[in-house]
Image (cartoon, rainbow, N blue to C red):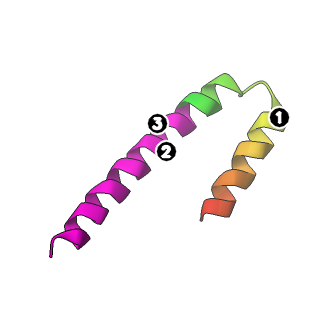
Amino acid sequence: MTNGLITNDLADLAIRALAFSALTVVTRAYSSEKQWFLFLTVVLALI
């Protein structure tokens, strides 16, 4: 079964997509502390 490989690839893609969106969110909301706090709580919740 190649389910393990497929899920690993999906997880890798998801992590890269999250990192990219995180960068864009940080650059956009850098001046707004509320959005930054919200983003931080989401990241901590995912971990």
- The quadrant in which the N terminus is found is bottom left
Q: Vertical placement of 13 versus 22: above or below?
A: below
- The quadrant in which the C terminus is found is bottom right
Q: CA distance from mark 3 to mark 2?
A: 5 Å
Residue range corresponding to the magenta coloring:
1-23
Which of the two labelled residues, at mark 2 and mark 1, occupies the earlier sequence position?
Answer: 2
Q: Position of residue 37 (x, y in %)?
A: 79, 44
Residue annotated with mark 3: 20
Task: Please name which of the two marks, 2 or 1, marks the residue nearer to the observer.
Answer: 2
Q: CA distance from mark 3 to mark 1?
A: 20 Å
Assess whether mark 2 and mark 3 are in contact (beta carbons under 8 angstroms): yes
Residue annotated with mark 2: 18
Mark 3 burial class by Cα count in 10 Å: few <14, some 14-19, many 20+:
few
Number of marks in picture: 3
**Could you tell me the amino acid type at mark 3?**
Phe
Residue annotated with mark 1: 33
Residue drawn at (81%, 28%) of the image: 32
User: Mainly helix, strand or loop, the magenta region?
Assistant: helix
**Could you tell me the amino acid type at mark 1?**
Glu
